[in-house]
Image (spheres, rainbow, N blue to C red):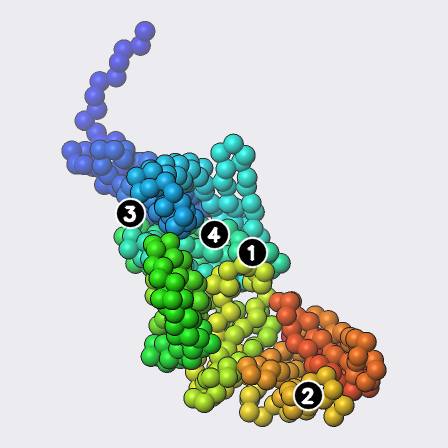
Amino acid sequence: MPAEAPPSDHAVPAAPGAAPPGERPQPGPYQVAGPSSPVGAPQPPGGWVGPPPPDPSARQRLHPLSPVLHGAKSLAVVIAGLSWSTLSRVGFGWFAAMVIVLALGASVLAVVSWYNTGYQVVGRELRIHEGLLWRRSRAIPLERLQAVEVVRPLLAQLTGLAELRLEVVGGGKTEAPLAYLSLAEAGVLRQRLLTLAGNSSGTVPAAQAQPVPAGAQPPTQPGRPLHAVSNRDLLISQLLTPQAFLLPFGVAFVATQFLSEGSWSFIAVASTLTAMAGVLLQPVRRVLDDWRFQLARDDDRLRIRNGLLETRSQTVPLHRVQTVRVTWPLLWRMKGWLRLRLEVAGYAAGEADERNRPDRLLPVGDQPTGEMIVAEVLPGVALAALPLRPPPARARWVHPLSRQVLGAGLTEQVFAVRSGLLTRQLTVVPYARLQSVRVVQGPVQRLLGLATVHADTAGGAGAAAVDRDLADAWALAAELTARGQVARRAG
């Protein structure tokens, strides 16, 4: 065997980047010195230390407190579902036991549902995974996404959580409600989804793609403030409703019945209170929903924030607005107030709960405020200058009182229709949003030589010019069709 070479007194040339003898090796540009990071191991640029950041496209779970909030919601539903008569029949002890058993069962189901629910963003798709026995995965193409809404019920506000709701084109209801996420995560995820929906490349900035650290604040939403509704005006507007005016008469009638019969049982009183609550439910819900209503403009989107017990942050893309509806209730007209509502493509018009439809544009306001907001949504449209013509005189046989109120007309940008006797309403439809035009005649209209022109939109309601002269109706339909085609080509 050859002899081992003795140590040399001459220096051996060091490899590039190696430390001199007797000194601790210095990390290179892609090296981090440390006991758990051997020298020479490849590391990310910039001197980053620690485990690699999580993949933003990986499957994510909802917040761990989600089952608690769902369980509390189920408890409220259970208590509301058990009637006063159930309490009187079984007694308070059995009633409480029933509530506890049902609430525990709902909580267990909520925990199981949370454990098996996840979401991930893959390319330009949002994928939702859920189910235990029957697994279900939904893929929502983000190019169909119209808006992402952040909703915060009262319990979510107390725990710093939020619910994300998606509206897509052609959806029968709100899609993929992610309940619940942290407020910061919900804000960043919403911005990321909206950016992907409007970006054909399918990429987002790195700041929006990274997960949100725990305890971080949500990103501030830009926008130019347009209007903030006064809470005082909101309260007064709901007092000027038929429910508020008729409630004292209903209370007086019920009290008279009780006094005359001498019956003040618990069931009778509870039933009366329940009936009164049902009458007041609509105006009270409107006050709670529209409390601190704020409207802002952000480039080609409207940002709406409102709510007291349940706050909502909505984003409405202006190019998806199908119609603007202006309403003057009878009791509001003495104060010069009106209400504005939107019809937006992609929102589920068939929702049983109208609170899930973000169609509010102005809960209450005066005429100049309404004019200003309409001009923001539909540039060049002035409510006071719309050329509205009434139906012919023979239409009084069909509308003896409201013929002069009815009207329809065309401007350079929109088709406008006015209707309503006690509650006056004006519907404005941009030509580019017309999906179809129909001319309809009923048996009475055929006798009088009248017809109704329907301008249909993607939202479903559209507008209708009722009881026009037959020749005028066909000419109006032809003009709407031509203008709609020109507007769509220009768009």
Q: Quadrant of residue 483?
A: bottom right
Q: Position of residue 222 (x, y in %)?
A: 39, 70
Mark pair 2, 4: CA separation = 48 Å
Residue at the image position 38 percent from the left and 43 percent from the top? 89
Mark pair 2, 3: CA separation = 82 Å
Q: Label 4: few (<14), some or many (≥20) within 10 Å?
A: some
Which amino acid is tagged 3?
Gly
Residue placed under numbered mark 3 in the picture? 47
Nearest the eye: 180 or 192: 180
Q: Earlier in the sequence, mark 2 or mark 4?
A: 4
Residue placed under numbered mark 2 in the picture? 400
Q: Position of residue 229 (x, y in %)?
A: 38, 78
Nearest the eye: 47 or 152: 152
Mark pair 4, 3: CA separation = 39 Å
Which amino acid is tagged 2?
Pro
Q: Which mark is residue 102?
A: none
